[in-house]
Amino acid sequence: MPARGAKWGRVADQRVQQLQHQVRVKEERIVELETENSILHLKLAEYQEMIGKSNREATRFYFLYNEKQYLQRNIHSTLIKLYQVIQKLKQDIKEFHSSCLELIRNYQDQYRVCLSEIVTAVHRTQLYNEALQSHQSRAVHLEKCLQEINEQYQIEKQKRKLLHNSLVELKGNIRVHCRIRPLLPFDNEFDDPVQNSSLCEKAIHAVDDETVLVKCNRPGHPLINKTYNFERVYGPAESQRTVFGEIRPLLMSLLDGYNVCIMAYGQTGSGKSYTMLGPHLPDDPALSLDSHGDLGIIPRAAEELFRLISENPSRSPEVEVSIVEIYNNEIFDLLAKDSCTLVSGVKRDVITTKEGKKELSRLTYKSVSSAVALMGLVAGGLRLRVKHPTLVHTDSSRSHLVITVTLTAASPPDSSHQQPNPMLKELICPSAPRTAGGEGPRASRRASSPGAGPVGAAGPPRQAQARLQLVDLAGSECVGGDAKLLVMLCVSPCQKHLAETLQCLGFGSRARQVQRGQAKRGVPASGKSK
């Protein structure tokens, strides 16, 4: 009890000291106010002396005196309010002190929890370090295994190339496919309505994937059924995707160093341009590549080519494009820039080289790095292509279109682990001269001399070339050439086109006989590149 009384005595002393301090402050303030009051009285005396001089000044001083009196009266109320503020501040300090104590207690609890979590995390980290060391040793082992698997993959990749090309050789370097288009509205347009029922009958049928049946029902002749066999037959219901699916392996042969040619052959209105290009190429090439449903062989081949190239970026070849139109036995370069030519390409002449090869003089080649860029050049070339209306449709192409895609890549100096492709010897050094100052490869990049030895022999890197030719013919014309050639016969199923259809199918059959004849004489199906 004495200690408690002493504590309260100290608190009371502190409180007395605080109150004494406040009283002193107030007394000082009162002294100040009394001083001010004395000054006011002096001024009031001065004003009273001046009353006689001016009633106006007396009145002013009177109001001033009243104002001072009002201020003195308000001092008390101000002091009361100040006291109330001080009391509230003390209460806030007390509450703040309580909050601080609560906060300290919470901090101590959280500190203990965090300390426990840190101890657990340290233990877990030690376990992770042990597991990491185990995984690192495992990763080293897997890297060795991956390296071995990669080496085996490269060996198997070369075997796959050989097997793929062997499969292509077995199918024949000249392959003939036949596509039967569906009946279209313009097939029913006749001047003589009596003939409409007979001539619009479907005369061409796809029996299976390799056989075409033709029902020859001509007036004045007995009914004759003819069958034609080809490597692949597409019925009217088969899509563009299905057609390209049979052609896709040829692009792998292209990257393996083989020349490839794909041409559409058939009468006007049989679907050649649709098969090769699709229904329509918009001005924006990116839009044509987005409409995947109806893409033709050319845009799909462009996409697939650059997809295959992207799978091996370390050996990406340079891709160049030339577009040629053949019209009325004259050849036009559709990529050449000539200010005098506004609606057609620039005419080019055929020359004979020292080796006896036929080449086009000053043909323009342009480098491309994407399918969109390639199709942009194709779209520009198509705008210059000669078109005339026919009875079938008003926008019929009246010329042959030849799109040549040339791949140029460096041959490795040592390829002893690979079997040389049979056509690469001919692909190392071919080439038509480029236009002066054009976008084609320089002469220094071209292949070495023809007598440089076989591919795979040790030596400096050389330039190897392979060409993909995509051909849209204007009408049923005879075709020559070798390398890997795929002829896409496009025929109409309508009875009124029977004569042209028979001519087209007959040409396809003769083309297949050519390759069979070569095989019987022991001539390699691949032939030489031209």
Image (cartoon, grey):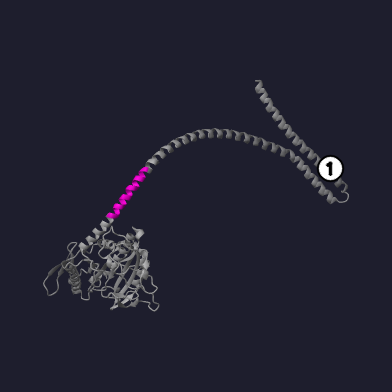
The residue range painted magenta reads: 137-155
In this rendering, the answer to whether 6 lies above or below 469 is: above
Horizontal placement of 418 versus 83: left or right?
left
Q: What residue type is labelled 1?
A: His
Residue closest to the eye, 132 or 88: 132
Residue closest to the eye, 246 or 77: 246
Residue closest to the eye, 64 or 425: 425
Q: What residue is shown at x 30% (from left), y 71% (from top)?
A: 402
Horizontal placement of 512 versus 426: left or right?
left
Q: What element carries label 1?
A: helix
Instruction: Pick out the residue farthest to the top.
Output: 1
Q: In which quarter of the image is the C terminus?
A: bottom left
Residue matched to label 1 = 41
Horizontal placement of 419 versus 27: left or right?
left
Residue 399, position as x, y percentages in the image: 29, 75
In this rendering, the answer to whether 87 lies above or below 67 is: above
Residue 28 visible within the image: yes
Residue 441 visible within the image: no
Residue 321, position as x, y percentages in the image: 34, 69
Residue 5, position as x, y percentages in the image: 67, 23
Q: What residue is shown at x 39% (from left), y 41% (from top)?
A: 133
Q: In which quarter of the image is the N terminus?
A: top right
